Amino acid sequence: MQVKLIKPKKVPGIPLQVKGNFHDTESIQKFENIHEAELKYNILKQRFFEINKWGNYSKENITVFTLCDSSGNIVQRLPLIGDYIKILLSEIKNPKTNDYQWVRIDMIDKTNPNRIMMQCRPSKLPRNEFAGKTVHFHSVNTTSTFVISKGNDYVKMAIYGRNEKPNQNTDIISSVKNMFIALGRVVGSSKIQWKQLTDGMVSLK
């Protein structure tokens, strides 16, 4: 019996998978006609750029997303290249800076009228890019690309993770912790969390 290996999808604008783990998480909402799909896509675009509200659309998921500017200040506006997103994966009272997973927005592509892409990668703390250590359980070579798109009768949100490896650019205790967290996400918890987010975002009826 031949085992079929699952390969990452080849999607325009998504980095090639070279090393480590990956995931392709996609959710689609169908509609009756192109007019309804267009209306719902406009709502999805608004949701997509309101990063601070992402947790509201992810049922049974306690993850909190917070948009920060290049200095690390929380902002209530559209995201920009160079901004950061700090992610709290579990309920922590009075969380400290290092309790968050930090990613930096490297790319926002709105050139295609039927698709918007935003790409992030694990980062050091704001204002500490040259001297600090990556504050994320994945390495800096990992990318997460968030994509929304529309067709004639549907809207879609996808998250494509590429080259996911544990972050070793930190102290020994954190390195071990990152390995366990990354392993846990390989076996399914991350996929479930991302799927809850994409399902919630396209739930537009």
Image (cartoon, rainbow, N blue to C red):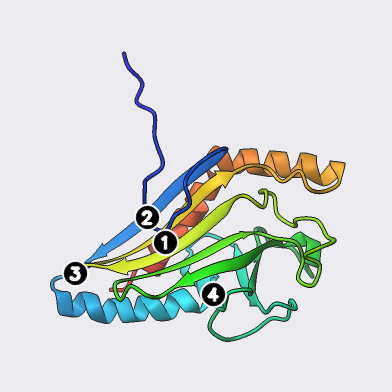
> Label 3 neighbourhood size at 10 Å, few (<14), some (14-19), many (20+)?
some
- Kindly identify the amino acid type of the residue bearing the numbered disc 3: Phe
Precedes in sequence: disc 3 or disc 1: 3
Q: Which residue is mark 1?
A: 198
- Reading the chain from its start, which is encountered first: label 4 or label 2? 2
Q: Are marks 3 and 4 in contact (CB under 8 Å)?
A: no
* Disc 2 packing (10 Å; few <14; some 14–19; many ≥20): some
Task: Tell us which disc is closer to us: 2 or 3.
Answer: 2
The answer to which image quadrant residue 183 occupies is: top right
Q: Position of residue 191 (x, y in %)?
A: 49, 48
**Residue bearing mark 4:** 51
The quadrant of the picture occupied by the N terminus is: top left
The secondary structure type at the circle numbered 3 is loop
**Mark drawn on residue 136:** none
Q: Which quadrant would residue 13 be assigned to in this image?
A: bottom left
Query: Which residue type does callout 4 highlight?
Result: Ile
Q: Is residue 119 above or below residue 165?
A: below
Q: Residue 12, percent across and down?
A: 37, 56
Q: CA distance from mark 3 to mark 1?
A: 17 Å
**Residue that mark 3 sits on:** 31
Could you tell me the amino acid type at mark 2?
A: Glu
Q: As shown in the figure, which amino acid type bears the numbered disc 1?
A: Thr
- In depth, the one of 130 and 186 nearer the eye is 130
